[in-house]
C-alpha cells in the first residue's frame, strides 16, 4: 500500500507539484569535467511517483572506463556500446517534460549536461530535485546521506550498488514514499533550475574505446565566464552553522575533485568563488593548511576559517539561503 490513501488522494494532491519525474542515475569514468558517462538509467514516474517504465543503456565513453572496481564496466564491455550522441534522442524522450530526480542531483545533471553539450544538443530538462535535499526537508532520521541509507529507511533492498539500473530502481522506490510524505505534510519540494550548457570547446574526437590506451589524452572544457554571485556576502563561515549563499570561498592547493568542477558546484550553490584571500573572504578550502602559499598565509593573518576538501563537500550539501 502506498501513502496515496485516505490522507493524500489524487484529488488533494498539491497542484503545485510537478506532473512527472525522471529518476536518473549515471555511472561515469570519474568526477572531473572531462570525464564521461559509461551507463545511464531512467525510471519514469507519474505525478504521484508511480513507475510508468524504465530504460537503461551502456555508453561508449571514447576513453578508458575509469574505476572499473566501482561500476564494473570494462573496456571490453563498453567497446560495442553506442556513443552518447547515438542515444541522446532516446535519453531526451525519457527526460522530456519531467523533473530530473537524482541522489546528489547536481553531479548527475552536470555530467548529463556536458554530454549533451559535446553532442551539440540540449537536454530537455528545466528542473531537478535532489533526494538528499528532500530527505533534509522531511527531516528524515538518517545517520548519513548515502543512497543505501535512504533505501534502508524505506525498506528498499539494493541488489547491485553502483549499477545504474539498480541504483535508479532503488531511488525510484525510495522517492515515492518521500514524495507522498512531502505531499501529506505540505512540504515545498526543493526544485532547482537546470541550466543547459550553451558554450563549449570541443577537443578532436578520439578513437572509440577498445582502440585507445590513454586514460584521458585530450579533454573537453567549456568556454564560459562565470556569472557574478547574485547574493550579498553575509560574512565569515562559522563552524557550528551552515554555509550561506553569498559567502566568498577561496581554494588553495591540490584537490581530489577537479578544481573547476568544485568551483562549479560552489557557484551553483549560490556561493562566490574568490580568487584571493582578503578580509572579506568567508572561507578557505585547502587540504594542506600548513603550506606556505599566499592564500594560507593571508588566511592566518586575517583569521579566515579554513576547512579541508572533504569537510567542504559535506557543507555544500546544505547551503542556507541568502537573507531575504
Image: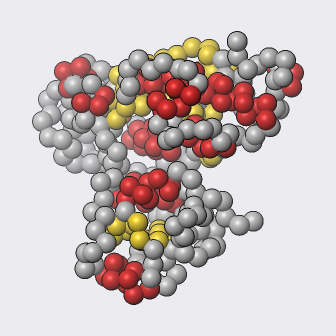
Give the colour scheme shown. Answer: secondary structure
Horizontal and vertical percent position of residue 170? 51, 22
Taking the spot 61% from the left edge, 16% from the top edge, the residue there is: 51
Q: Quadrant of the N terminus?
A: top right
- The answer to whether 305 appears left or right of 153 in the picture is left
- The answer to whether 164 appears left or right of 104 in the picture is left
Which quarter of the figure has residue 129? top right
Residue lying farthest to the right in this orientation: 11
On screen, 44 above or below 132?
above
- The answer to whether 71 appears left or right of 198 in the picture is left
Residue lying farthest to the bottom in this orientation: 301
Horizontal and vertical percent position of residue 43? 54, 21
Q: Quadrant of the C terminus?
A: bottom right
Comparing 163 with 61, the one in front is: 163
Taking the spot 27% from the left edge, 48% from the top edge, the residue there is: 219
On screen, 44 above or below 295?
above
Amino acid at each position: 500500500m502506498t501513502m496515496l490513501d485516505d490522507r493524500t488522494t489524487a484529488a488533494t494532491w498539491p497542484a503545485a507539484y510537478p506532473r512527472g519525474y525522471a529518476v536518473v542515475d549515471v555511472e561515469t569514468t570519474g568526477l572531473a569535467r572531462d570525464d564521461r558517462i559509461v551507463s545511464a538509467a531512467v525510471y519514469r514516474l507519474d505525478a504521484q511517483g508511480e513507475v510508468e517504465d524504465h530504460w537503461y543503456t551502456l555508453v561508449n565513453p571514447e576513453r578508458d572506463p575509469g574505476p572499473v572496481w566501482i561500476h564494473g564496466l570494462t573496456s571490453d564491455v563498453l567497446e560495442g556500446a553506442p556513443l552518447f550522441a547515438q542515444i541522446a534522442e532516446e535519453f531526451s524522450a525519457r527526460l522530456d517534460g519531467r523533473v530530473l530526480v537524482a541522489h546528489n542531483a547536481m553531479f548527475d545533471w552536470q555530467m548529463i549536461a556536458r554530454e549533451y553539450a559535446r553532442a551539440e544538443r540540449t537536454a530537455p530538462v528545466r528542473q531537478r530535485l535532489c533526494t538528499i535535499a528532500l530527505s533534509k526537508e522531511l527531516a528524515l532520521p538518517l545517520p548519513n546521506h548515502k543512497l543505501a541509507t535512504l533505501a534502508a529507511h524505506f525498506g528498499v533492498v539494493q541488489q547491485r550498488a553502483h549499477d545504474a539500473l539498480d541504483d535508479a530502481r532503488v531511488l525510484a522506490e525510495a522517492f515515492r514514499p518521500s514524495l507522498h510524505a512531502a505531499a501529506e505534510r505540505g512540504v515545498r519540494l526543493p526544485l532547482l533550475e537546470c541550466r543547459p550548457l550553451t558554450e563549449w570547446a570541443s577537443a578532436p574526437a578520439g578513437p572509440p574505446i577498445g582502440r585507445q590506451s590513454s586514460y584521458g589524452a585530450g579533454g573537453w572544457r567549456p568556454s564560459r565566464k562565470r556569472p557574478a554571485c547574485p547574493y550579498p556576502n553575509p560574512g565569515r563561515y562559522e563552524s557550528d552553522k551552515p554555509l550561506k549563499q553569498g559567502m566568498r570561498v577561496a581554494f588553495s592547493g591540490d584537490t581530489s575533485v577537479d578544481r573547476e568542477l568544485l568551483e562549479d558546484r560552489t557557484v551553483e550553490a549560490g556561493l562566490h568563488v574568490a580568487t584571493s584571500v582578503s578580509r572579506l573572504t568567508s572561507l578557505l578550502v585547502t587540504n594542506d593548511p600548513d603550506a606556505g602559499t599566499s592564500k594560507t598565509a593571508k588566511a592566518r593573518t586575517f583569521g579566515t576559517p579554513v576547512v579541508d576538501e572533504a569537510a567542504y563537500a559535506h557543507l555544500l550539501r546544505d547551503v542556507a539561503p541568502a537573507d531575504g
